[in-house]
Image: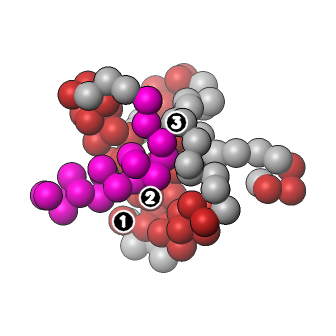
Amino acid sequence: MEARNVKPDIVTCGILYDAHGSGFGFGFDELDYRIKMGFFGDVVELKTDPLVLVAFGKGDFLKIVEEVDHTRSQSWSYEHLIDLVKQRQQGI
């Protein structure tokens, strides 16, 4: 993705997060790498066509993000959302 100057959106972030939670070991390693590279410091964007979400559904990450966003409507960074989702899943 970096070679083509493509930045991931919230769906990509959610897929990586949920993949790790489902037992795929690459999820957090990939997220950590992208955080270190500065990809997730940006304001969250949804670049994926909403029809894709309707067709394939939303993972746990996106469902939690929707709950959090309804309670506090503001601009989020990906890093902040990842931390919020981790806290929410751990019951903090």
| Disc 3 residue type (three-letter) | Val
Residue drawn at (21%, 52%), measured in percent from left and top?
88
Q: Which mark is residue 44?
A: 3
Q: Which residue is mark 1?
A: 21
> Which region shows up in magenta?
75-92
Residue drawn at (61%, 61%), measured in percent from left and top?
34
- Residue 49, image quadrant: top right
**In this rendering, would 31 be left or right of 90?**
right
Separation (CA) of disc 1 from disc 2? 7 Å
Q: Which mark is residue 73?
A: none
Q: Pick whichever, 60 or 54, lies toward us.
A: 60
Task: Residue 65: give x, y in percent of width and height.
Answer: 34, 39
Q: Check the image and report above or below for 35 versus 23.
A: above
Task: Residue 56: give x, y in percent of width and height.
Answer: 48, 37
Give the structural element (helix, strand or loop) at label 2. Answer: helix
Asked if the residue at tag 2 contacts the one at tag 1, i.e. Cβ–Cβ closer than 8 Å, the answer is yes
Question: What is the quadrant of the N terminus in the image?
Answer: bottom right
Task: Residue 9: give x, y in percent of width and height.
Answer: 59, 40
Give the structural element (helix, strand or loop) at label 3. Answer: loop
| Disc 2 residue type (three-letter) | Tyr
Q: Which residue is mark 2?
A: 17
